[in-house]
Image (spheres, helix red, strand yellow):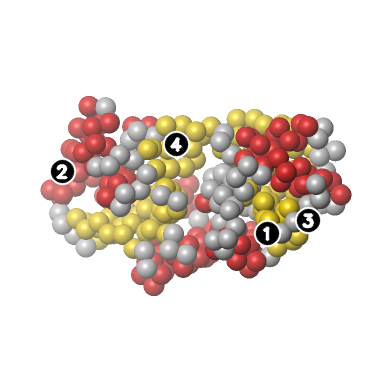
Amino acid sequence: MAHTVTQETFETLHSLWVDVEHSLEWNCLFVLPGWLKVWWSVFSNESSPYISAVRDKEKLIGIAPLLVKGEEARFIGDPDVCDYQDFIVAPGMGREFFEALINHLRQQGIRSLDLNTVRADSKVLTELVAVAKSLECEIFCTPEDVTLELDLPSSWDEFLSKLTGKQRHEVRRKLRRLNEAGEVNYRVLEGFNEVMDEMETFLALFGLSRSDKAAFMTSQMSTYFCSLAESMAKAKLLKLYFLDLDGEHAAAVMCFDYNSTIYLYNNGYDGRFSSLSVGLLSKVLTIKDSIVRGRKKYDFLKGTEEYKHRLGGKPVPLYRCQVKLG
């Protein structure tokens, strides 16, 4: 069956995302058009975008958000700021999409696909790998990390009941100590203007929390975070949480709210308040807010920090995958 492959821009990609006539599964936060465009504007270096849309006649069956450098293609984005990525595929069309994509890339002289980091349940591992093998490609997939996820219950009390007795006691004790220490104000910012007004505060708290975070937040990375906040706030996908104590900013958390999942992207806190566990509690309170809002899942994202396990997170394996197209 003949398929057509067209090259899209970030603008046409956005149009495809908002067009409800298409049945594509945009399941991965880190390949949404706004996210990709921001990454590209800050980090693209000496590569070229290669956003390929595959159609069966007039029906759009999938999108590959790639960039090309030499004879290698990979996802737009990188593991430092995109925890995991994937292709955008219509339900039941994986085989057709990946066959057409691989054949097209071969025709364009692409010799390898480096797919950064992908989840165990990604289209890459559940569909692409089998198609690539049938087309005599070499596939290399190695464990890279984990992301931890929590299925959110219907109430805060139910969440607490699912913790171990020790952890339940610790969460309650820490919250009580915080409230006894002064006037606590926990707020969530979602509107574009209020988010942008407070991004400088968020970045300051980010840098204050740990020396490695301060080193990570270069001027280029600061530009990325502010541009990402701007893009995602416009799309109504950003939640910026602040924990204030007696009118002073103690901690902040940046989350994304997409497809009934809350993604814990990053956080920071003022070390002066570390004895009150403001870093942990600011995240615990995002879980409470997510439950109140009726969200179904909480993704702690990449990394095996102990607090994620203690708060009920379950690991989902992440893999680094490369496909040699020949």
Kindly identify which numbered label has been placed on residue 148. 4
Disc 2 target residue: 176
Which residue is tagged 3?
A: 4
Q: Residue at x 49, y 37 (%)?
A: 147
CB contact under 8 Å: marks 3 and 2: no
- Estimate the x, y position of residue 10 in percent, counting from the top left: 64, 64
The local secondary structure at tag 4 comes to strand
* Residue at horizontal 85 percent and vertical 38 percent from the top: 326
Residue 222 in view, yes or no? no
Give the residue type at disc 3: Thr
Q: Marks 3 and 2, how far apart in space? A: 61 Å
Would you say the residues marked 4 and 2 are in contact, meaning their CB atoms lie under 8 Å apart? no
Which of marks 4 and 3 precedes in the sequence?
Answer: 3
Q: Are marks 1 and 4 in contact (CB under 8 Å)?
A: no
Residue that extends furthest to the top in the rendered view of this protein: 165
Ranked by sequence position, the earlier of labels 1 and 4 is 1
Local SS, label 3: strand
Q: Quadrant of residue 18?
A: bottom right
The front one of 278 and 126 is 126
**Residue 135 in view:** yes
Disc 1 marks a residue whose amino acid type is Ser
The residue to which callout 1 is attached is 44
Left or right: 69, with 207 as reference point: right
Disc 1 secondary structure class: loop
Badge 1: residue crowd in 10 Å (few <14, some 14–19, many ≥20):
some
The Cα–Cα distance between marks 3 and 1, rounded to whole angstroms, is: 27 Å
Label 4 or label 2, whichever lies nearer to me, is 4
Residue contact at pointers 3 and 4, CB within 8 angstroms: no
Q: For numbered disc 2, what is the local secondary structure?
A: helix
